[in-house]
Every structure is written in structure tokens, then in C-alpha cells.
Amino acid sequence: MSDGFSNVIDSVSAPARRAEAVVASDTQPLAEVPKALFVGTGGSVTMRGVGGGADQLWKNVADGTLLPFRAEYVRATGTTASDILALY
């Protein structure tokens, strides 16, 4: 298949090229820092941004929400949302 965007430089604001399921953990960072997170089933998400000093609790995240947040950690404690994808 032809890709008309294959010569475009990837950036944070460019569309994601792949997605991976997020396994929330209180101790382990994400394998890579994503461009954004997609929340399939809504709830709360506790996460820490890349280089951030403290966790943040995002409440009432709706089903199907795209969070333009470069998370280093998605914590199990406090996270009730599920079906979360990291977008790269």
C-alpha cells in the first residue's frame, strides 16, 4: 500500500503510527513515552507526565477520549478507566 505521508517528519502533533495496550502499574513506567493516550472505557486515570514530579488524577474521562498527554507512568492505583491505548 502506498503511504503519501512516508516522507513527512514524525512529531508530537503528527498522527500516531501505532498503538499499544497500556498495562497500568504503580512501579513500572511505560516502555516508551507516547504522543497521547486513548481511553476506550471511561473512568479515572492516574498518570505522571514525562519529566513530571507528581502524579495527576484525571477524573471523569469519557469513553472514547483521546488524551493529548505524554505520560511516563499510568498508575494502577486510582485508575478505573480501561481499554487504554498508548499512541506512538
Image (cartoon, grey):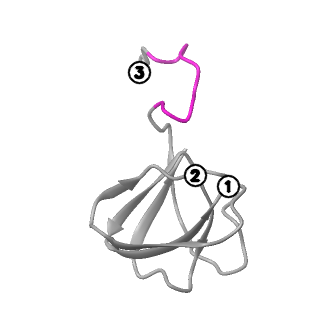
Q: Which residue is drawn at 58% across and 20% down?
A: 9
For label 1, the SS is loop
For label 3, the SS is loop
From the viewer's perspective, tell me whether residue 28 is left or right of residue 46: right
The image shows residue 85, relative to residue 55, as above or below, that is above
Residue 12 image point, x, y percent: 55, 36
Q: Residue at x 61, y 72 (%)?
A: 55
N-term-proximal mark, 3 vs 1: 3
Image: magenta residue range: 5-14
Q: Which amino acid does label 2 sit on?
A: Arg
Residue labelled with disc 2:
70
Q: Which of marks 3 and 2 is in front?
A: 2
For label 2, the SS is loop
Q: Which residue is drawn at 50% across and 84% down?
A: 78
Residue 26 image point, x, y percent: 66, 81
Q: What residue type is labelled 3?
A: Met
N-term-proximal mark, 1 vs 2: 1
Residue at the limit of the structure toward the left, as seen here: 63
N-term-proximal mark, 3 vs 2: 3
Q: What residue type is labelled 1?
A: Val
- Cα separation, mark 3 vs mark 2, equals 30 Å
Q: Which residue is drawn at 41% across and 82% down?
A: 80
Residue labelled with disc 3:
1
Q: Nearer the viewer, mark 3 or mark 1?
A: 1
Q: Which of 48 and 36 is in front in this view?
A: 48
Q: Residues within 10 Å of mark 3 (few under 14, many from 20)?
A: few
Q: Is 6 within the magenta?
A: yes
Image quarter (top left, top right, bottom left or bottom right) of the N terminus: top left
Q: Nearer the viewer, residue 57 or 12?
A: 57
